Image (cartoon, coloured by chain):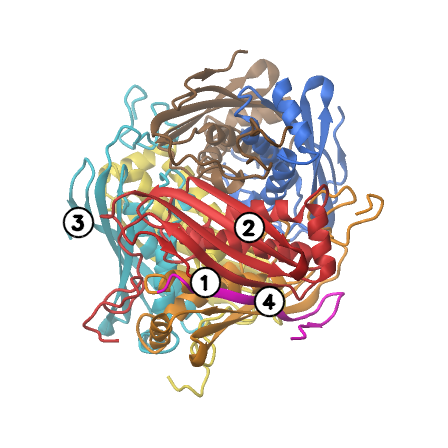
Chain colours: A blue, B brown, C orange, D red, E yellow, F cyan
């Protein structure tokens, strides 16, 4: 990396030192981010998670609350993330019977100067970790995968839609 | 699920309501948990991450700190996790040139009544999300995968070693 | 509850799942919320609290700080509360000699998209709990009661004034 | 208050200044605290809360999680409270049809040097505030009352059982 | 202090009670605060800190992250500080070979109703404490000094530039 | 720094990467740390701080609470600090009329595996910053200095007493 040129990684200054990027001059736009991920587990754990959605032992209900709360904690967790005031967030689950997998979807909205990608991705991650925590008594081999940004709107860089 | 029998998901009581499992009577043992995960990215982002390990723009150095700090915040993030006092933690990275992927490894140790699996898994997750945050200016399509427990020692359930 | 109709409880979506209500399209207005509550105690505890207001052992001074700080932590405590930036807050106490009771009043102000009722109610609650904590060495039977919203101004729903 | 004698309020030193009481020399004992409180509301809000316990719009499920998480945050909220590691906690609700009231019960356990009364009382308070938050769209006049310690075991002061 | 007149210390009301100052009616302006401080140490610690800037054992890199994160936590740490959304922050270090001292500089920016002095001063303080933490194995006598505001722009009170 | 030898800075491993030092094998001992610092101000601010100690506008009372609470937050603020359970803490102030300076003293105690130096130093720092915050309306040129460890007892390294 040439010390004369600014890194394309905006979280570093010309000297290569980490800083919080200055967004003071950016306008406020409506922004929305959509993220997803999944957690796969063994048949017994999957059966219990699925049973819990109907009445008792509601694993996904607890994981949803954990994800919604985590979306509000991003600036504490990610060192160079800007603090911001999200104005909406949702978490949805999709149960995939054939693969014993729970798909997790998060949407976060805000009007502001920076994107809310990290909020959506963190909501998915903590929601998945909560499912792990609640099911680890019956399956320690669960795997969390495919945490990714699906789409993002608003901001100078415009719309992003993941291709695969 | 039969309402007469206790759920194998220990985070729920007989009525199916969430609670914090009582570990008061458990003995204190030395515990250690090893977790891993990975984040894949495009060649440009990968090149910048790799360059940063040598001098300036140290993405992985920042991600390491984020992961080490997150291991101390698990009881705030995971609703039914017990608060505990970890006594060691490490984060290591492995750069996979052929797949433009960074593998992340976390180890957390403690003497106490409950396991530290969630601490190690959370450290890996937040470390990966920090890499995402710092590289998203050049690649929004990064994907975080394979967050899993590799091994765990200590506690009544003994040693767990992941099979694949 | 008919699954076809939206719940009057706005914190749930059509499927009955918890979410953070979308306030992105709401305008910013000046808002103010007034809440109150009380804690009753035995004569000895009451005497010590009252004595502390004059010079030393200032229970209410500490409880005021605790309440003012708690008003800034609502989004961490209440799962579906929006993060927001309060612009003013006060806590006042009224000493009721005949009933050995301390009345607690909180006012919180903000210009924003959502109300600050939860901030005022939380400030009262944590202030009361702090009084309990500081006096429990002399009275474990204190009781916290009548935590309620007195008044609220601003926002689309307009002025609310509690009737009793 | 005589400046020569120590205040019976142990959170103050001889000069009347607040401090964190030294519990370093106290032994570790098994401790348990039981607290309760209630929130009363109008018939419509009550009906919705009760309906939510069966399937969708689960107000009490969310309030339980909020209370369980708040029990882990007491040392951040109450200025002079000691940090501690709770080993169990539960929240239960009782629906009182005739008075449109929800009774809230919290139990917190720990082996340690200080009591867990504040943890149980805080769990009840934040659980009640969460119910308020989720129902305030249909009733702003809800009232939270009778937050009190029911019982406490362990520690030098022995068993406490509330009399009324 | 005359009880009839308002204290020049705006954090107290007419009765001398602490409150959060009402800034609701203040306009939003671009604000910036510059703070500094220093930590002096023995030659061995200084040598290790300096060596770490080049490759491994990067004390200052960790201290920078700690300072940047602390700037986002001021409203949790300083009781009467307003919550706010900083839009930029930087931390820089200057190594003073002749005095074995590290000078620390922080800049914080925001568009808002209150100043960001406390954010810049807190960033410097926590950054210095982190250096202490990381070097205390070789020098317990380090001293942190001269934490001060250098300059501040924006807001009704206009520009402040420290004179010495 | 020779890559073959371990750094004397124990927060780094052999490769120079930051980690949380493993204290799992260390015994628990009684530990105590004493730290100090000072803040100097102009005569008007000093007069107001001093007046507040008697009745109203109690700057030092608020700063004491801030410091006591900050001692419980060290593991969130200092990246590689171990979480721990302090068992006592005090903050005292000394008013130096001739130099318009407030001296701040903190003592923190614990039985555990690591020292509490950082807790005492952080308590002093946040207490000083709170004084700055509350007096900045009348003096923006205050300076915080001489934050240092006075003494430490307990632990393998034994007693440390600062020499100057």
The answer as to whether the residues below labels 3 and 1 share one chain is: no
Residue at 73% over, 17% down:
A98
Residue identifier under label 1: D164
Residue identifier under label 3: F162
Q: Residue furthest top?
A: B164
Residue C141 lies within the magenta run: yes
Which of the 4 image quarters holds residue C35?
bottom right
Q: CA distance from mark 4 to mark 2?
A: 21 Å
Question: Which mark, by number, is residue C148?
Answer: 4
Please, which chain is the residue tagged with disc 4 on? C
Q: CA distance from mark 3 to mark 1?
A: 56 Å
F105 vs B63: above or below: below
Residue A129, given in percent of the width and then of the height, sits at 57, 31
Q: Is residue A25 left or right of residue E62?
A: right
Look at the numbered disc 3 and give the secondary structure of its residue: loop
Specify whether residue B120 is in view: yes
Q: CA distance from mark 3 to mark 4?
A: 53 Å
Q: CA distance from mark 2 to mark 3?
A: 41 Å
Q: CA distance from mark 4 to mark 1?
A: 24 Å
Residue identifier under label 2: C76
Look at the numbered disc 4 and give the secondary structure of its residue: strand
Q: Earlier in the sequence, mark 4 or mark 2?
A: 2
Cβ atoms at labels 3 and 1 below 8 Å apart: no
Q: Which residues are magenta?
A: C139-164
């Amino acid at each position: 990396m040439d010390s004369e040129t600014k890194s394309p990684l905006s979280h570093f200054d010309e000297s290569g030192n980490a800083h919080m990027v200055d967004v003071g001059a950016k306008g406020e736009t409506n922004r929305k981010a959509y993220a997803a991920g999944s957690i796969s587990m063994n048949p017994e754990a999957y059966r219990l998670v699925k049973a819990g959605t109907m009445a008792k032992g509601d694993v996904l209900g607890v994981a949803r609350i954990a994800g919604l709360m985590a979306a509000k904690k991003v600036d504490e967790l990610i060192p160079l993330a800007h603090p911001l005031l999200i104005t909406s967030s949702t978490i949805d689950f999709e149960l995939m019977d054939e693969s014993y997998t729970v798909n997790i979807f998060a949407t976060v909205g805000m009007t502001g100067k920076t994107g809310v990608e990290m909020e959506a991705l963190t909501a998915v991650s903590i929601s998945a970790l909560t499912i792990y925590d609640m099911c680890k008594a019956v399956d320690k081999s669960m795997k969390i995968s495919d945490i990714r940004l699906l789409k993002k709107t608003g901001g100078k860089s415009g719309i992003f839609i993941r291709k695969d």
